[in-house]
Image (tube, rainbow, N blue to C red):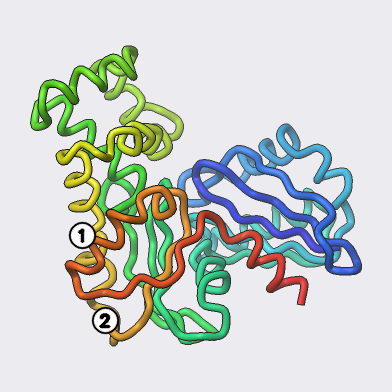
C-alpha cells in the first residue's frame, strides 16, 4: 500500500493506493504547514481527522508526503513522524512545489506555480526543479496568494482606499471582522495566513466590480514580476498553475500574465489526480 498526501496550510488531501496501484480511499483533513507548526500537530490531525486512513494504511510500504514548508531538516522530521505514525517501511517527504511540478509538467519543461493560501513557483526541466524564487511567507512575500489577496482587501477596507459601497458590502458580509478582531486573528491567531485567505470568497463574489477586479489583477501582476520573470526563458515557457486561487480567478490571472508577456498553460485546482497517476505507474 502507498499513501500520498498533498498538504497545504488550509487542508491536506490524502489518498491510499492498494497493491494494484488503484486508489481505495481519499479524504481531506485540516491543513498543516511544516514551517509554521510542530510535527505533533500533524500527528493530531491524522488521528483526529483521518482515523479511517490510519486504520487502513497502518503498515503501508511507502508514504509520499508533499507539504508546504517541507524543506531541509523539516523534511526529515516530518518523514520520521509519518513513518512512526503509520508504521510505514519508508516515508518520502518533499515540498508541495515538487508535487505541483510533477502534476503540471509531467516530463516536459515548464514553470510550475502554486496559488492557494500561499504562493510558490519553480523552474522545472522535466525531471527536477532547477530554480525556485523563495516565496518568503505571507508577511514578506506570497504575492498573488489567498493570504495576500485578503491582506490587500483588508488594507483597502480599513484604510478606506476602496469605495464606500464596497466597505458596506464587506461589513454586511463579515459583521464580526472589526479592526480589533482582524488584528487579533492576524497577529495572535493560530493560522493567520488561512484567516487572511478566508476573505477571498468576498473577492470572488464581487469580482465584477472594477475596483475588486483591479485589486486581484494587480496582485497577480506582482506575483509575476516578483517571482516568475527572472527565470531563464520565462517568456518562452508555459506557466502552469495549481491552487484554488488560480482556479477561481483564472480570467484575472490570464490578464496579468498577458500584460507581463507570459503564456499561461494548465490551471487546475488540485494535484492529487495527477499524483495518483504518477505514483500508480
User: Residue 119, located in which quarter of the rendered image?
Assistant: bottom left
Q: Does 176 sit left or right of 73 as displayed? A: left
Residue at left 91%, top 67%?
A: 19
Q: Does 70 sit left or right of 206 as displayed? A: right
Q: Residue 16 carries which label?
A: none
Q: Which of 228 and 263 is in front in this view?
A: 263
Residue at left 25%, top 51%?
A: 140
Q: In this view, does 270 lie above or below 171?
A: below
Residue at left 24%, top 47%?
A: 216
Q: Does 38 sit left or right of 253 as displayed? A: right
User: Residue 277, located in which quarter of the rendered image?
Assistant: bottom right
Q: Is residue 155 above or below residue 149?
A: above
Residue at left 11%, top 21%?
A: 164
Residue 122, given in percent of the width and then of the height, sits at 40, 73
Q: Nearer the viewer, residue 193 or 200?
A: 200
Q: Furthest residue to the front?
A: 208
Q: Which of marks 2 and 1 is nearer the N terminus?
A: 1
- Marks 2/1: CA–CA distance: 14 Å
Residue 93, given in percent of the width and then of the height, sits at 63, 64
Which element type, helix, strand or loop, lies under badge 1? helix
Which element type, helix, strand or loop, lies under badge 2? helix
Q: Name the residue under label 1.
A: 221
Give the crowd class for mark 1: few <14, some 14-19, many >=20 residues within 10 Å. many
Q: Mark 2 points at which residue?
A: 235
Amino acid at each position: 500500500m502507498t499513501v500520498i498526501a498533498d498538504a497545504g496550510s488550509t487542508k491536506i488531501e490524502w489518498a491510499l493506493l492498494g497493491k494494484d496501484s488503484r486508489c481505495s480511499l481519499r479524504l481531506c483533513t485540516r491543513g498543516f504547514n511544516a514551517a509554521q507548526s510542530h510535527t505533533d500537530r500533524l500527528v493530531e490531525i491524522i488521528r483526529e481527522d483521518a482515523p479511517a486512513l490510519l486504520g487502513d494504511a497502518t503498515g503501508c510500504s511507502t508514504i509520499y508526503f508533499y507539504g508546504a514548508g517541507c524543506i531541509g531538516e523539516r523534511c526529515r522530521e516530518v518523514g520520521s513522524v509519518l513513518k512512526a505514525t503509520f508504521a510505514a517501511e519508508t516515508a518520502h517527504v518533499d515540498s508541495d512545489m515538487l508535487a505541483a511540478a510533477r502534476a503540471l509538467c509531467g516530463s516536459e519543461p515548464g514553470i510550475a506555480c502554486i496559488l492557494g493560501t500561499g504562493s510558490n513557483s519553480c523552474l522545472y526541466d522535466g525531471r527536477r526543479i532547477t530554480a525556485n524564487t523563495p516565496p518568503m511567507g505571507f508577511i514578506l512575500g506570497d504575492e498573488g496568494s489567498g493570504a495576500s489577496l485578503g491582506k490587500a482587501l483588508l488594507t483597502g477596507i480599513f484604510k478606506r482606499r476602496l469605495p464606500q459601497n464596497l466597505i458596506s458590502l464587506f461589513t454586511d458580509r463579515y459583521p464580526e471582522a472589526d479592526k480589533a478582531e482582524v488584528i487579533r486573528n492576524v497577529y495572535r491567531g493560530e493560522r493567520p495566513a488561512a484567516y487572511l485567505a478566508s476573505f477571498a470568497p468576498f473577492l470572488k463574489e464581487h469580482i465584477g466590480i472594477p475596483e475588486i477586479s483591479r485589486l486581484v489583477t494587480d496582485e497577480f501582476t506582482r506575483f509575476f514580476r516578483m517571482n516568475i520573470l527572472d527565470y531563464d526563458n520565462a517568456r518562452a515557457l508555459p506557466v502552469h498553475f495549481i491552487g484554488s486561487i488560480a482556479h477561481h480567478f483564472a480570467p484575472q490571472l490570464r490578464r496579468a500574465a498577458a500584460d507581463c508577456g507570459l503564456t499561461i498553460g494548465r490551471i487546475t485546482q488540485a494535484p492529487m489526480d495527477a499524483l495518483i497517476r504518477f505514483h500508480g505507474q
